Image (cartoon, rainbow, N blue to C red):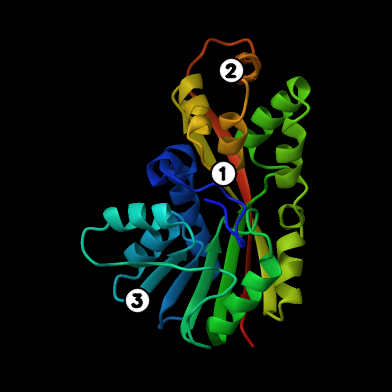
């Protein structure tokens, strides 16, 4: 689903889980070690997607109220289906027009949101607004330009074969929040205080090339939109070239790729 606030194709929660959700969950745990929330108070996950961070917060702080909000109804529906009870709470809403009152939350997060939002400065101001004074506002984005091997291998190979792939690649790699200091600068521009940043790294483990390749074809995000509109013959050419990059002269089999992200936290004034 695309919207005024989001440029991310989000039509199928299960397809997103197969593509990136499994790695979002792995990153969520590392990210929560960084955020430093106040010890009590409600927590909000903005742009929660299928709920990786929302569930991680609920597991880590089972006595606290945790809300996940996302503009994509299919993702919210999928997240709700994964609950064992009525926690955490998942709601449909716009990151750029949060419906919550000023100062409600002790901690407000955005997990992998800011690469795919048209006006990140508006969303950050909204996150600051709903955080209580002294509360934590934190976000994490993939280092798509320099630290996300699964995307770099795919897009650089595709661009060498299909010039039209350059638009999708550059929208990810040249995004200001993906460069060193970019997201932290946005935090400061939004009026957040005591801004700190850290590089986080996880591993993405694949059983074989098809485990790496098939998730790209689920129609989610920029890569899903690209392949959905690609001529079959060109798809085959790109697949074989990416397979060559994945195997790199070795037999097909398991691979463990590094994936780095920029994490930023600040305090609401």
Decide which of 81, 153 is in the foreground and name it: 81
Give residue 76's position: percent from left, percent from top: 39, 58
Task: Say if 22 sits above or below 3 in the image.
Answer: above
The residue tagged with tag 1: helix, strand or loop? Answer: helix
Residue with the mark numbered 1: 221
Residue with the mark numbered 3: 65
Please identify, in this view, whether the residue under mark 3 or under mark 1 is nearer the observer: 1
Task: Say if 161 sits above or below 11 in the image.
Answer: above
Residue 242's image quarter?
A: top right
Image quadrant occupied by the C terminus: bottom right
Give residue 77's position: percent from left, percent from top: 34, 55
The residue tagged with tag 3: helix, strand or loop? Answer: loop
Residue with the mark numbered 2: 232
The residue tagged with tag 2: helix, strand or loop? Answer: helix
Residue at horizontal 59 percent and vertical 17 percent from the top: 232
Residue 37 in view of the camera: no
């Amino acid at each position: 689903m695309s919207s005024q606030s989001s440029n991310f194709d989000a039509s199928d929660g299960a397809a997103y889980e197969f593509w990136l959700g499994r790695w979002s969950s792995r990153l969520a745990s590392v990210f929560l070690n960084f955020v430093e929330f106040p010890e009590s108070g409600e927590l909000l996950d903005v742009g929660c997607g299928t709920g990786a961070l929302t569930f991680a917060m609920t597991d880590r702080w089972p006595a606290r109220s945790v809300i996940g909000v996302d503009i994509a109804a299919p993702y919210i529906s999928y997240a709700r289906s994964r609950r064992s009870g009525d926690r955490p709470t998942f709601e449909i809403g716009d990151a750029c027009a949060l419906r919550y009152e000023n100062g409600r939350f002790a901690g407000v997060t955005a997990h992998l949101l800011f690469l795919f939002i048209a006006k990140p400065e508006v969303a950050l101001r909204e996150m600051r607004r709903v955080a209580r004074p002294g509360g934590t506002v934190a976000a994490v984005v993939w280092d798509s330009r320099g630290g996300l091997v699964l995307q770099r291998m795919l897009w650089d190979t595709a661009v060498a074969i299909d010039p039209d792939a350059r638009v999708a690649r550059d929208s990810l790699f040249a995004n200001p929040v993906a460069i060193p200091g970019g997201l932290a600068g946005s935090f400061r521009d939004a009026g957040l205080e005591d801004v700190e940043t850290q590089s986080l790294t996880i591993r993405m483990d694949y059983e074989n090339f098809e485990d790496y390749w098939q998730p790209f074809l689920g129609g989610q995000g920029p890569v899903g939109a690209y392949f959905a509109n690609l001529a079959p013959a060109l798809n085959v050419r790109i697949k074989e070239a990416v397979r060559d990059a994945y195997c790199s002269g070795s037999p097909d089999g398991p691979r463990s790729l590094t994936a780095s992200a920029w994490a930023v936290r600040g305090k609401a004034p």
